[in-house]
Image (spheres, rainbow, N blue to C red):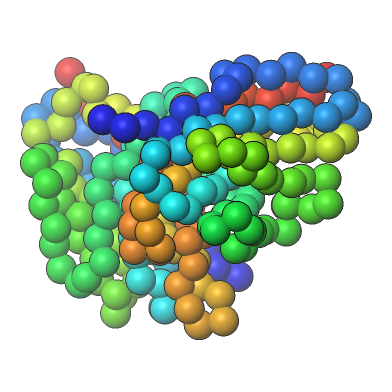
Amino acid sequence: EPEVTQTPSHQVTQMGQEVILRCVPISNHLYFYWYRQILGQKVEFLVSFYNNEISEKSEIFDDQFSVERPDGSNFTLKIRSTKLEDSAMYFCASSYSNSNQPQHFGDGTRLSIL
Amino acid sequence: QKEVEQNSGPLSVPEGAIASLNCTYSDRGSQSFFWYRQYSGKSPELIMFIYSNGDKEDGRFTAQLNKASQYVSLLIRDSQPSDSATYLCAVNGLLRGGATNKLIFGTGTLLAVQP
C-alpha cells in the first residue's frame, strides 16, 4: 500500500539553526500538509499546499516557516531560526483531493531543539 | 473558535466488549469527519471517515454521525488488546463558509482493552 515517507525520523538542532524536514507524499496525491504535535498535546494544522502554492496556513505558520515542492516528489518544511518551542513531532500528510478525501500521515519527524 | 471535544479517558473495556468513543464539534457547517488511531509515539493512522448522517461500518468498526447534535462516534466491536491506543477525532475546517482541507483534531481518547 502506498505511504507517505518522512526523513529524518529524528532531528536534533541547536536553537537558532535552520532545519529542513522532508516528505515524499503518496505519488498520485495532489494536496499536501504539515501538522505538528507537541508532546502530550493535540495534533495541530500548520499548512496546506496545492498546485505549487499555499492554500491555507495557521497562526503557528509564521515567517519562520516555509514550504516548498522542489521537484515532482518531495515536499519540504523549513524552519529558518528554530526556537525551543518548535520541539515537536512534525507530520506530513497527503490526500488525493479536497476536504472530502482522507489525509494519510507519514511516520513523522521528531524535532528536538537544544 | 472551532473546537473538537473528546473525553481524554482512559476508557477501559474488557477484551471482546464493544468500545464506544465519542466526539462533539462546534462548527455546524463541518462536512467531513475522520477517526484516526495513534499508538504512543507513532503517527495518526486513518481508521474511518464519514460524511453523511447515520452509520458507516467497516469490519469491527462503525462510525456514527449526527449532524443535528454535532456528534460523531466510533464503535469498536470485539475489542482486542491490540486496539489499545489513542483515538483521534478530526473534522475538516471551514473558511468563509466553504470547506477546507485543514483538519481540526480533538485531544483524543485513550482506549485500554484489558485481556
Q: Observer-nearest residue: A42 or A69? A: A69
- Counting from the top left corner in percent of width and height, residue B85 is at 34, 30
Asked if residue B60 is positioned above or below residue A10 in the image, the reply reads below
Dividing the image into 4 quarters, which one contains the N terminus of chain B?
A: bottom right
Outermost residue on the bottom side: it is B97
- Total labels drawn: 0
Asked if residue B105 is positioned above or below residue B37 in the image, the reply reads below
Res B89 seen here: no
- Counting from the top left corner in percent of width and height, residue B42 is at 45, 26
Left or right of residue A52, residue B102 in this image: left
Outermost residue on the front side: it is A71
Q: Quadrant of residue B45?
A: top left
Asked if residue B111 is positioned above or below residue B95 in the image, the reply reads above
Q: Residue at x 40, y 72 (%)?
A: B30
Left or right of residue A110, residue B28 in this image: left
Outermost residue on the right side: it is A16
Q: Residue at x 17, y 18 (%)?
A: B115
Q: Observer-nearest residue: A94 or B27? A: A94
Left or right of residue A54, residue B4 in this image: left
- Counting from the top left corner in percent of width and height, residue A111 is at 68, 25
Q: Residue at x 32, y 48 (%)?
A: B35
Q: Observer-nearest residue: B57 or A94? A: A94
Res B32 seen here: yes
Q: Residue at x 29, y 27 (%)?
A: B84
